[in-house]
Image: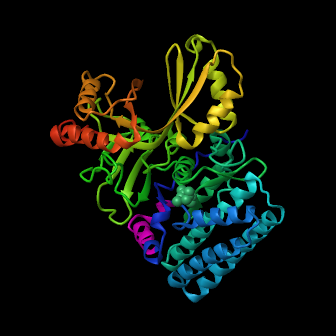
């Protein structure tokens, strides 16, 4: 009889994610090394984004090639030079040689791909993904070699080769966690048994047949959560150029403060509705894991950031943050019977899904279905629904220049008077509420206002909740350490 396989050892305690703003020049690469060295390095795994600005440059080269504009070569040359300069500043001659060899392989593949696209003036999602994934490959190898330079042992894992299998090709895709768990077991074993620091490329995985696929812009946070899942890490720290989630966008409210603790649901709402601190999908892969997620300032890591964990506190009745999204449009689908026509929302939803259009939120009445959409998707959504030729729909209209404010905090639904207070602030400031939605989420209330009144609204709400009542301090939740 076969022995039961030994439960895999767990070596990695923390996953560090370095975003592009943490990898922008040689001193930031050195800072990343310092942060790793301050830990027990062999218990850390690292996930990287591309060097700051590189994904945009690759995208620019891609579009030039698609337009059969040979100037893509200049853009790529610039990216190459940028990495070679970094390597020259960070590495000894011997390691510089190794870096330039690795870079050459990546750039010659890039050249081939872009040349092919220029020739035919056409591309595929898989080709685009391969091109855009080069940024993370370059930064992972560069960071890996910089670690070696600092006396650490590293191993680079390119994430289209280790089982981050996605369900469809293209962009904005998600990993199939079942397949991942199975595929990644051997990598995880190798890491647990080895004494090196694994460095993973963020941003991409691949399809079953090996085609590179992207998780969407800023998707490395999501990658880091996947890797943390696979390694059964206890803590995921994403280093950012901000100290964490704030009570409002500091560009709008300079007095905004860092939120010390967030429940996962609160963080998910904030990430989804406009806060750029975390990729909205980050919490998905760890929804069944007791992982602690921390956002920390890269430049001032000693400063407490935001800790996100499973709710362990009693409900607290407060708003922790106001997230603002200023790119909102509403598509109004009107008809006397749309509110009670069975299946119509499903029909609309599936048609929009076919076009990759994401509905942010839906508000319905008997005579109108209101789809809250990102501005960039609204016109296309309108055309798609028109093409349905659905007889119960009598009128379609799009309203642009709106903004959505998400007021986020645990206990909002149960706390009497929250809506009243919001209404009174809005009426005092003479701001018209286009929409108000409460109760859909237990941690968020959404307001939609005209875009040109949104900043005023956020300032007033923040003043009301944070300056006048200091609710955050009064109701500070008690969180307990998780023993994972
Ligand atoms: N480099 C990719 C981007 O700029 C992914 C990431 O940064 O997370 O979108
Ligand atoms: Mg980036």
Across and down, in percent, residue 370 comes to: 52, 25
The colouring scheme, among rainbow, by chain, secondary structure or one colour, is rainbow
Q: Is residue 481 above or below residue 125?
A: above
Horizontal arrangement in the rendering, residue 478 relative to residue 173 (left or right): left
Part of the protein shown in magenta: 30-45
Q: Examine the image and state in which quarter residue 466 appears.
A: top left
Left or right for 280, reference 483: right
Horizontal and vertical percent for residue 380?
64, 38
**Quadrant (top left/top right/bottom left/bottom right) for the C terminus:** top left
Q: Is residue 161 visible?
A: no
In reply to whether residue 32 is colored magenta, the answer given is yes
Q: Is residue 368 visible?
A: yes
Relative to residue 138, is residue 402 drawn left or right? left
Of residues 142 and 215, the one nearer the viewer is 215
Residue placed farthest to the bottom in the image? Answer: 93
Residue sitting at x 31%, y 50%: 252
**Quadrant position of residue 91:** bottom right
Q: Which residue of the protein is positioned furthest toward the left in this rendering?
A: 468
Please state the horizontal and vertical placement of residue 177, each as a whole percent of the image: 62, 41
Q: Front-most of 349 and 112?
A: 349
- Quarter of the figure with residue 385: top right
The dominant secondary structure in magenta is helix
Residue nearest the viewer, comparing 239 with 172: 172
Q: Residue at x 66, y 73 (%)?
A: 76
């Amino acid at each position: 009889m076969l022995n039961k396989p030994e439960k895999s050892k767990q070596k990695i305690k923390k996953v560090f994610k370095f975003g592009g703003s943490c990898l922008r020049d040689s001193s930031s690469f050195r800072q990343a090394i310092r942060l790793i060295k301050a830990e027990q390095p062999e218990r850390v795994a690292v996930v990287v984004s591309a060097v700051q600005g590189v994904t945009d440059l690759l995208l620019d080269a891609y579009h030039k090639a698609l337009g059969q504009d040979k100037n893509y070569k200049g853009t790529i040359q610039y990216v190459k030079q940028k990495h070679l300069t970094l390597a020259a500043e960070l590495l000894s001659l011997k390691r510089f040689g190794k870096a330039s060899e690795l870079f050459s392989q990546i750039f010659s593949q890039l050249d081939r791909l872009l040349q092919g696209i220029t020739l035919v003036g056409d591309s595929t999602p898989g080709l685009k993904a391969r091109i855009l994934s080069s940024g993370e490959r370059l930064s992972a190898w560069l960071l890996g070699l910089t670690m070696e330079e600092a006396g650490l042992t590293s191993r680079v894992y390119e994430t289209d080769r280790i089982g981050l299998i996605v369900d469809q090709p293209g962009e904005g895709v998600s990993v199939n966690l079942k397949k991942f768990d199975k595929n990644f077991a051997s990598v995880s074993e190798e890491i647990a048994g080895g004494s090196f620091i694994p460095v993973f490329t963020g941003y991409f995985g691949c399809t079953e047949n090996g085609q590179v696929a992207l998780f969407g812009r800023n998707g490395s946070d999501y990658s880091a959560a996947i890797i943390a899942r696979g390694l059964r890490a206890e803590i995921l720290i994403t280093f950012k150029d901000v100290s964490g989630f704030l009570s409002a966008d500091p560009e709008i409210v300079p007095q905004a403060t860092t939120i010390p603790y967030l429940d996962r649901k609160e963080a998910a709402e904030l990430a989804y509705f406009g806060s750029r601190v975390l990729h909205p999908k980050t919490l998905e892969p760890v929804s069944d894991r007791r992982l602690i997620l921390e956002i920390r300032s890269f430049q001032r890591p000693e400063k407490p950031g935001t800790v996100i964990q499973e709710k362990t506190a009693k409900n607290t009745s407060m708003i922790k943050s106001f997230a603002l999204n200023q790119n909102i449009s509403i598509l109004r689908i009107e008809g006397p019977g749309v509110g009670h026509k069975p299946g119509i929302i499903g029909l609309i939803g599936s048609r929009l899904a076919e076009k990759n259009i994401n509905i942010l939120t839906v508000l319905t009445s008997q005579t109108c279905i209101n789809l809250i959409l990102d501005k960039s998707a609204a016109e296309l959504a309108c055309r798609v629904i028109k093409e349905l030729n659905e007889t119960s729909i009598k009128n379609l209209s799009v309203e642009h220049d709106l903004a959505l404010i998400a007021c986020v905090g645990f206990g909002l639904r149960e706390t009497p008077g929250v809506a009243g207070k919001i209404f009174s602030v809005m009426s005092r400031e003479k701001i018209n509420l286009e929409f108000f939605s409460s109760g859909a989420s237990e941690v968020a209330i959404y307001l939609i206002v005209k875009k040109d009144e949104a900043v005023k609204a956020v300032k007033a709400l923040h003043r009301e909740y944070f300056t006048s009542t200091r609710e955050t301090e009064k109701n500070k939740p008690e969180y307990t350490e998780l023993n994972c």
